[in-house]
């Protein structure tokens, strides 16, 4: 399963609230969910947070596709070409959109309440470190560090797929996901000594601290969390 992350920002003149409302209640339901190859789909909409006072993006779409063939087919459908793609300039600054295809790795897996919020952290590794060494190190560091993060409910690490490195470097290498019961719990964790596990600061570490982009979000499922069957010949 390919776990795709698509970060987006409001078009000029649109407020964050207007942007989020359009994405969730118009673009997602009228266009994106109609792309038949999408197996699961959720929107992560940004919440105000102390670590992100001047956001680059205001949300992230998470899309799951079963394989590369269905991913390619999805962007050749009329639902995408005459629907979702044509609608994008109505709400998004498309020149700021960033996408990353990932494989998921579960670090800590507990149930989360409906009130839960999530910290997502888009990052690039320290290029002095070999890609395989970085991936192994990140999984191990989070497995060890997750237990020390106050009130952490769940943690996943989404690593860029192998194909992202076919020609040169991937723009980013990962999106780390950290779930908390509410905004207050997330802020408490970010104020603790465990902050550096979520937001690395050391210049000699595995991640490049100048390319670590956190965003606190609320999740909104559009398709899922159960996988939608593929509609043939849609």
Image (cartoon, grey):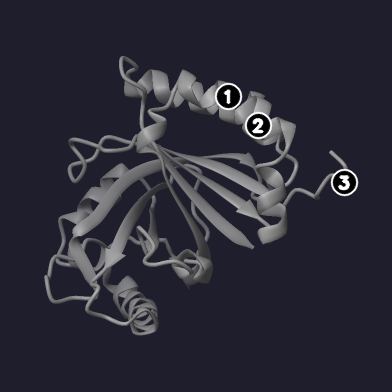
Per the image, the residue denoted by label 2 is 81
Mark 2 to mark 3: distance in Å?
A: 18 Å
Judge from the rendering whether residue 185 lies leftward or rightward of residue 86; answer left or right: left
**Is 74 rendered above or below residue 211?**
above
Residue under label 1: 86
Q: Position of residue 216 (x, y in %)?
A: 32, 45
| Residue occupying image coordinates x 32% and y 55% | 121
Instruction: Verify CB contact (< 8 Å) between mark 2 and mark 3.
Output: no
Q: Are the residues tagged 2 and 1 within 8 Å (C-beta)?
A: yes
Q: Earlier along the polypeptide chain: callout 3 or callout 1? A: 1
- Determine contact: label 3, label 1, CB under 8 Å: no
Distance Cα–Cα, label 3 vs label 1: 24 Å
Residue 205 appears in the picture as rendered: yes
Q: Is residue 85 above or below residue 110?
A: above
Quadrant assignment, res 146: bottom left
Which SS class for mark 3? loop
Task: Tell me if mark 1 has few (under 14), some (14-19) or many (20+) residues whose alpha carbon lies within 10 angstroms of its own.
Answer: few
Q: Residue at x 40, y 18 (%)?
A: 18
Closer to the observer: label 3 or label 1?
A: 1
Indicate the quadrant where residue 172 lies.
Answer: bottom left
Q: Quadrant of the C terminus?
A: top right
């Amino acid at each position: 399963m390919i776990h795709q992350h698509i970060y987006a920002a409001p078009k000029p003149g649109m407020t964050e609230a207007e942007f989020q409302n359009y994405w969730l209640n118009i673009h997602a339901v009228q266009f994106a969910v109609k792309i038949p190859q999408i197996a699961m789909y959720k929107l992560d909409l940004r919440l105000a947070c102390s670590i992100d006072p001047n956001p680059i993006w205001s949300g992230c779409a998470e899309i799951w596709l079963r394989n590369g063939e269905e991913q390619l087919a999805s962007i050749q459908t009329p639902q995408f070409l005459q629907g979702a793609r044509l609608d994008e300039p109505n709400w998004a600054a498309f020149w700021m959109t960033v996408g990353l295809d990932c494989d998921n790795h579960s670090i800590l897996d507990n149930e989360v309440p409906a009130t839960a919020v999530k910290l997502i952290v888009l990052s690039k590794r320290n290029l002095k470190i070999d890609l395989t060494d970085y991936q192994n190190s990140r999984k191990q560091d989070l497995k060890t560090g997750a237990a020390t993060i106050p009130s952490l409910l769940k943690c996943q690490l989404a690593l860029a797929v192998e194909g992202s490195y076919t020609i040169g470097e991937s723009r980013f290498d990962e999106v780390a996901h950290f779930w908390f019961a509410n905004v207050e719990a997330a802020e408490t964790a970010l104020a603790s000594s465990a902050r550096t596990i979520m937001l690395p600061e050391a210049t000699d570490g595995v991640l490049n601290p100048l390319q670590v982009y956190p965003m606190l979000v609320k999740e909104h499922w559009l398709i899922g969390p159960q996988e939608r069957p593929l509609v043939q010949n849609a």
